[in-house]
Structures are given as structure tokens and as C-alpha cells.
Amino acid sequence: MELSQRSKTNIDFENLFSLNTLTISTFPKYGSNPELINNMLRNDVLNDVSYKSGRVLGAMSTQPHFFAAKLYSEYMEKNLGDRGLNPGTAKIEAKLVQMMGSLLGASHTDAIKGNMTSGGTESNIIAIYLAKSLQPEISHPNIVLSEAAHYSFEKIARLMNIELRFAHLKDDFHPDMHEYQSLINDSTIALVGIAGTSALGLVDPTDKIAELARKYHKFLHIDGAFGGFVLPFLEKLGHQFPIYDFRSPYINTISVDPHKMGMNVNPSGIFLVKDGDDDNSKVKKENGFKIPYLAGGGFRTFNILGTRPGAPAISFWGLIHLLGFEGFLEIVQQAWDLTKYLEDQIQKLPQLSTVCSPETNVLGIQFSNENNIRSSKKIKKLNQILREHDWYLGFFENRGLLRFVSMPHVNQAHIDEFLNDLKRILYYHF
Ligand SMILES: Cc1ncc(COP(=O)(O)O)c(C=O)c1O
């Protein structure tokens, strides 16, 4: 849906699902004709913002690659929850896991296991579930992580009754590693490192965290939901990061999301675990949930979902073969170049500044020379006005920043148009 076709309603994003915003719909007694149904649908989705419009500048998701979308629509009936009926799709999933393991530093001799998930949230849940169930003797478990961690860890804490021990961020927005270390105790079941934080796309000192995992014999999970499919390409382009993947012997699990920079369809995450040999196999020790009733049944799974789509595994496997490493490298290169371009332009505006130098294709934007409270208020107002002008950035109220993410659907013309509007808005409203 193009911008011009969308009505300019002010959507109440915070209360989108409160009951009073829903119109009551009754179950139709008789069927209708497809054209009429399509018209009704169009009417309803009119207010959705499409990636194609170029107005979505702050999401970590994007328009799926056409080839992934094509494969997805061809294989929609596949259900990876029933592997017995879909051994072919299960094999593709297994190959995908190996390919992603090799992208993320695993060697030929490493036993990489894992599965497709519905995204970073589910992968993170599985990782911490695995860590917890490997240490049943710990009665009040905690995990240690940076304050910049994704809110999926709040879900984990509540679902599994796990204490979150947050290390504060320093002025450079990376966690204070002295504090991080001090939070580790006998009840710590896992350390978490973030490779590509949600707000700023920064990489935790994963090498130092790995060193702590070695020293204290702790399970180490890397949340690479965003960065896991960006950093390998940026490294190839010459950028340097602390080791964030299976090149480190102390990293046990990684989450990485094809539905973010991988341009795959929703929903698609990948959970990877580097396993030991048979005697030291983590996956074998805590062998997941047994599905007792399916046709090809009897197997075990770590997935939270029961029925789960197989088409995203097929479409991502296909897309990787279509583009290859070099194809994704070009996509990441463009995303990076545009991030640097916007950084440069924002720094020329007297009212705004960038929060820090970007490490990936994510840029934080804030008001210059303001204390936290005032900056938060102003950024809230700016976000509201930008939305009224149909620009959608990520809004982190508690950090007083707007998040720009240079996803593959964003091009230079979109950024220039955004900058023109932004300058006008700053002039008239601030
Ligand atoms: C670092 C990080 N981890 C996890 C997630 C959760 O991913 P999903 O929304 O696919 O569950 C996100 C989402 O943006 C993220 O940025």
C-alpha cells in the first residue's frame, strides 16, 4: 500500500489492543465472494505501513526478498512440528543449521545442533531453558546480562522464574564489565552477551564475557538476533569486533534471525547450540520435549511452538543459495554506507546529535545538549510529529533516543526525503 493511499489517522499505538478500540465483528452466516472479501481486507489494512513505502526507518524487519516470498508461498503446508511427515523439510532445516553454524564460526569438527524458531524471542527462551535444565540443582537461578538486553529476557525471567542481574551501561553504552563480573555467583546459570543491541546495534565485549564464562565455568548464550546476520559481513568488509560466535570455545548457544537482515519471511529465527560429543552432549542431557502422538512421532524438540512453519526454513535455504555470501555482503555494505551517510547528516543539524558512533547499521538519534529528562520529552514530541508525517523510527523513551535502522528496503532517496522533513519539523516545532 503506497503512502498516498493511506488515510492519515492518528493511531493510538500504545492501546492498539485495548478492547474499546476494536469494533465488534460477528461470525458471518454465509460465505461471500472473493472480490468483496479482498475489498474488505484492503480497507482494514489501509493503515498498515509498508516497507516498500520507504517510511519505515526504525524497524529491524524488512520486506522479504521476492524469492523467499515465492518459496514460502509454494511450501506453506509444511509443518516442522511433524517431522515424521516432513522428513525432507526437516533435512533442509538441518542443513540450514549447519550453514548458519559455519557462517557463525563453527569448524567442521564442531557438533552444531539447533532448529528454526519463530524469532529471537523464542531462541533466547530455548537457550536459557537449556541452561536452566542442565543445572537442576540451582534452586534460585539467575542470569547475568547487560542493561541493553532485549525485553525477551524479561519474558524469560517471568516464564521461568529466573532473576535478571543487569550490568549498567557505561558512557560508551557498553556494559560495565567490572559490575558484570561482580554479578556472577553460584546461582548464575548463564551469562548472556549481545551481538547487536536492540537500541543501538552495539556489540557487547563478548570476548571478555567469554573469558568470564571460562573462568567461572558458566553457560554462555549470545543474542545475535540482529547482529548474527550482520557482523560476519561487516567483518569481511574490514570492521573489527570482539569474537561473538563459535570461534570462541566458551560460547554455547547463539540466536540469529533470518527475518531481520536475512530478508526472510516472518517468522524465522534460528537457535544454534555447539554440543559436546555423546558423553558431553548438552542436547542429549536435556533432550527437550517429547511429542508423543504424531504420525512419524516419538521425536523430541526444544521448540516452544508445537505446529511450526517449515516454509521459512525452505525459503531461507533457497535465498542463501540464490544470493550467496557475496550477495548478502552487498546488502550489508549498502546498509552500512547509508547508516554512515545519515550519521554525517544528523551531525550537521544543530539541534540533534547521534548517540554514539554506529557499530552496525543502527543509529541512535537524540537532542544535543539536553539533560535526560528534557531530551526524553523532546524526543517523544519529535517521534509523535514524525509519525504524523508518516515517518516511523524506533522510539526508546527511557533512553531518550530515536532508533534508525538501515534495513534493505531503505535507500538514499528515502533518507534524503526524511532529512528534508526532519529539518522542517525541527525548524517549526523546536
Ligand atoms: C537483540 C535482540 N534480541 C531478540 C530480539 C527478539 O526478536 P523477535 O522479535 O524476532 O522475537 C530482538 C528484536 O528486535 C533483538 O533486537
Image (cartoon, rainbow, N blue to C red):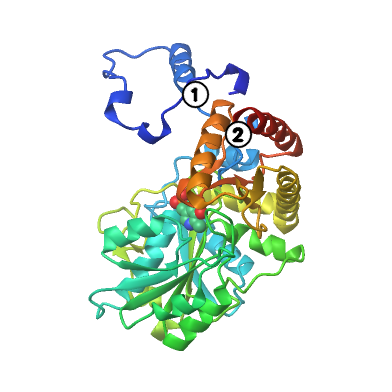
10 Å crowding of disc 2: few (<14), some (14-19), many (20+): few
Q: Report the quarter where the C terminus lies.
A: top right
**Front residue (pair 326, 131):** 131
> Horizontal and vertical percent for residue 342?
72, 45
Q: Residue at x 59, y 74 (%)?
A: 106
Residue 137 is at least partly visible in this image: yes
Report which residue position mark 2 lands on.
430
Q: Is residue 327 above or below residue 71?
A: below
Q: Residue furthest bottom?
A: 215
Q: Is residue 87 left or right of residue 174?
A: left
**Front residue (pair 211, 95):** 211
**Which corner quadrant of the image does residue 133 belong to?**
bottom left
Q: Residue at x 34, y 63 (%)?
A: 299
**Which corner quadrant of the image does residue 98 belong to?**
bottom right
> Tag on residue 47?
1
Lower sequence index among marks 1 and 2 = 1
> Horizontal and vertical percent for residue 185?
34, 82
> Horizontal and vertical percent for residue 63?
60, 38
Work out how far the residue at label 1 is from the one at label 2, CA to CA, in angstroms: 28 Å
Q: Residue at x 28, y 58 (%)?
A: 158
**Front residue (pair 201, 248):** 201
Q: Is residue 405 left or right of residue 273?
A: right
> Horizontal and vertical percent for residue 417?
72, 31
Q: How many marks?
A: 2
**Which corner quadrant of the image does residue 162 belong to?**
bottom left
**Front residue (pair 181, 219):** 181
Q: Residue furthest left?
A: 139
Q: Amino acid at mark 1?
A: Asn
